[in-house]
Amino acid sequence: MRVCLASTSPARLMLLRQAGIEPLIMSPEVDEDAVAAAAATERGDDLAPDELVLLLARAKAADVARRLPSEHPAFDGVVIGGDSMFAMDGRVYGKPYTPEAARERWQGMRGATGVLHSGHSVFRVRPGAELVEAVAVAQASVTFADDVTNAELDAYIASGEPLHVAGAFTVDSLGGAFITRVDGDPSTVVGMSLSTLRRLIAELGVTWTDLWTPRTAQ
């Protein structure tokens, strides 16, 4: 049973590898801003964080699942797509991209608690069969230390790590020392909830342990 990760996120790839899965990787050809804007226009308002991460996760997984048979005709397994956003005090934070944006966010995050929303879409793909999808959103609350110094913050931003991750922080790397509490599946904060993925994959009739890559093949 094979796994295709519809993402180029190093964090999601690391999660699957740590869980014993060596996936095929395909980059989704999705304009996320355009998808979000179209949904907001149709709704007449911005989507809530949990709705938006699920919309984007589904769009990315669906794109890869539909392209996969032509590029890998014998593929028999699952396609996994995900998207994450961090919300705090009624505001949604994606990737900051610039040091200035990351510093501004962290100045408000010290001592505060926010929620990481992670959307999951899993497609069962097999030769000659229709695609079947299972979806879910997982949340985990994150509390940040209130004594992070400006010098620590400057060093963290200079590392470049917080610039390209949702919410401007990680829990599994340099940013982990600045987090005092996580309520929920910790892997949700990394990029995908493994427990949620296991449940979705079971809904598609697949056993999680069947996705483990034999050690000789890793």
Image (cartoon, grey):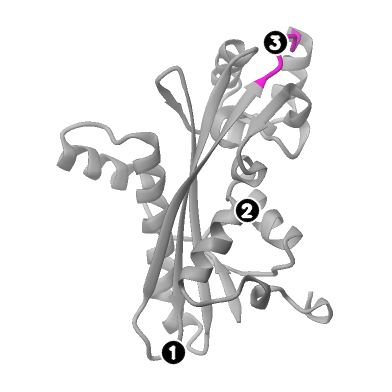
Asked whether 195 or 92 is in front, the reply is 195
Q: Amino acid at mark 2?
A: Arg
Residues at marks 2 and 1, CA–CA distance in whole angstroms:
26 Å
Residue at which label 3 appears: 146
Task: Establish if 114 lies above or below 132.
Answer: above
Q: Amino acid at mark 1?
A: Pro
Examine the image and state in which quarter residue 49 appears: top left
Asked whether 185 or 144 is in front, the reply is 185
For numbered disc 3, what is the local secondary structure? loop
Which residue lies at the image location 70% right of the left edge and 10% below the top edge? Answer: 146
Q: Position of residue 178 (x, y in %)?
A: 74, 22
For numbered disc 1, what is the local secondary structure? loop
Asked whether 199 or 123 is in front, the reply is 199
For numbered disc 2, what is the local secondary structure? helix
Report crowding for label 2: few under 14, some 14 to 19, many 20 or more residues within 10 A (C-alpha).
many
Q: Position of residue 143 (x, y in %)?
A: 64, 22
| Magenta residue span | 144-149
Q: In the current view of this chain or complex, which residue is farthest to the right?
A: 216
Disc on res. 150: none
Residue at which label 2 appears: 12
**Could you tell whether 187 is left or right of 120 in the image?**
right
